[in-house]
Amino acid sequence: MRRKRLLTQNNLRATPRVKLQLFFRCENLQNQDIIVNSSPILVLSRRDAATGPWLEHSRTEIIKNDLSPVFGKAIDIEWTFEEIQRVRVDIFNTSSDGLFSINDLIGGVEFRVSDIVTASNSTIRAILRGFLIVTSEEIREFGHTVKMRFEGAGLDRKDFLGKSDPYLLINRRQSDAQLYTAVYRTEVIKNTLDPTWREFEMEVQNICNGNMARELNVQVFDWNRATQHEIIGSFKTTLNEMLNGGEYTLVNEKIQEKKKNYSGSGKIRVNAEMVLNSSFLEYIRGGCEFDLIVAIDYSASKNFVSKGRQDVEQAIWAVGSILADYDSDNRFPVFGFGAKVEEGKPSCFALNDNQQDPYVTDLMGIIISHIESKGKYEPGPVLFTPVIEAAGALSSKHNTQGVQRYNILLIITEGKIDDLQSTIDAIVKYENTPLSIVIVGLGHGDFEEMNKLDGDDEPLESSNGTIATRDIVQFVALDKYKGNMEAIARATLEEIPGQLLSYMQKRGFRPNAPIIKPEALFRDRANSTMSLRHSMSLGPNLYRSNSVCSDASAPPSPLLSNISPMPSPRVDHSPKMY
């Protein structure tokens, strides 16, 4: 467990939470009043599940008598990569006393947070009896870190038969109090009066709670095995001061009180520099895309029993419906493994029978390829190594500052493999490529080997002794989530943002400049861009149903084209909300 914790410290947080601020304006809204112009208000609602209720999240101020309002109140919202986050914006006309009801609806639009994240200029423009323009900005709270190194010189001798065993402790002052909280402790360096502690990196938030002028108390102690550690001395400073570098004198107040001509208990030299860490969102907006690679285990006939086939399709849809929002071409390589193959043919085979071009189009293409493979393969040895080699080869193609693509290999399996150590070797081999591996286990099989590959107990070690420095494998047992598609998506993808950041940081790749695309009207995530009543009033040319499925819990159906447009989802307009 200890080795795993050390590994995690070198990686970034598994699931970076990104806060966005949304800004709203409208153009040419249809007037709802007769004598004066409408006085619009904007209400933003959210729902947690595809069929759950819409609940108000926040609202703007009322803009009086204005059909092209620019709302001054921004709305904060959190973006989480591994979740489908549904948002609905409705514009209402208000009465002179500020009240409104569903009958005052001017129009509404439904979108995902991922839509605004991936939009050109971070802006979407939608039709709703006029136009709604939504723009987002990231709220950077934890983007800065500080790299620091402390060196001591001429410290007081504290050990009778030796020198000292010093370590350094950084404490920050609590607000409006003379109390201090420890925020960082260095390692102990044995038997020296001139220590140089290891360089370390910390978030500004963790050092001084974001206030770089907050007082810090830096203490140096002599470590003792059997007795209380003894203070050598301390000094007070701020992060701002330490960023300017320099040298500090350690003061031991007890010695200072007793000793005349006391000149201090040693010197501490500080080297500190600010490091601006790029955020996950900056990479996405700079054009970094995700490529999904799918590999399906054919080692058991259970794959083609109804329940087994549904499990495979659930896993594909849960993961793919998230990643599709961040992939512009929606073409996916799909492989099979765990089957008997003819001599000379690869054990990791393309489901479309084209090993040179194993790609299919969109998520339904993956599922159709799986369905059409029914009965084509007999169970054989389960070998992960060729699968990882194939994914590694694909991921190695995208490895430059200018072309940033990150690959996610989804392996769907029953759990038992025949090449554990060579699989570990392959994972360690490709850990320095833009690749993460998500393993989804079907049924109630033996997943001990899958848990080992996940590396939750300790980092993977190859047969030649190389220890993995990036944790790129995530294992999820499908049955644990009992058909909850969104829970499956969260469990499988929650570590991806941190893994991407660790890769980019390790390679020294910075986010590219945001991609600027020609402006296009946003296609509403709901079946209608407004209520049926409003859409019909605008004529058939302004009604558009969305061409992509909007929810991980709702795989596409051939019947979708026959579904009539639905009225806009209604927000609960009870007195406690409006």
Image (cartoon, grey):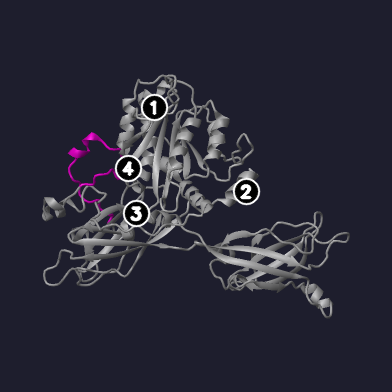
Q: Quadrant of residue 145?
A: bottom right
Q: Residue at x 20, y 54 (%)?
A: 530
Position of 53 relative to 124 (above/below): above
Residue situated in front as seen by the camera: 288 or 228: 288
Give, as a single range, the part of the protein colored magenta: 545-573
Separation of marks 3 and 4 at Cα, in angstroms: 14 Å
Residue 118: which disc? 3
Q: Amino acid at mark 3?
A: Thr
Callout count: 4
Q: Amino acid at mark 1?
A: Gly
Query: How far across and how far down the image is residue 169, in percent?
Result: 69, 63
Residue behind mark 1: 308
Image marks 4 and 1: residues in contact by CB distance under 8 Å: no
Image-based side of 521 in relation to 193, left or right: left
Query: Which comes before the other along the chain, label 4 or label 1?
Result: 1
Element at label 1: helix
Residue 330: which disc? 4
Query: Which comes before the other along the chain, label 3 or label 4?
Result: 3
Query: Which comes before the other along the chain, label 3 or label 1?
Result: 3
Image-based side of 565 in relation to 282, left or right: left
Image-based side of 68 in relation to 244, left or right: left
Quarter of the picture holding the C terminus = bottom left
Query: Which comes before the other along the chain, label 4 or label 2?
Result: 2
Query: Which comes before the other along the chain, label 1 or label 2?
Result: 2
Between tags 4 and 2, which lies in front?
Answer: 4
Q: Amino acid at mark 2?
A: Leu
Query: How far across and how far down the image is residue 130, in percent?
Result: 18, 61
Element at label 2: helix
Residue 6: which disc? 2
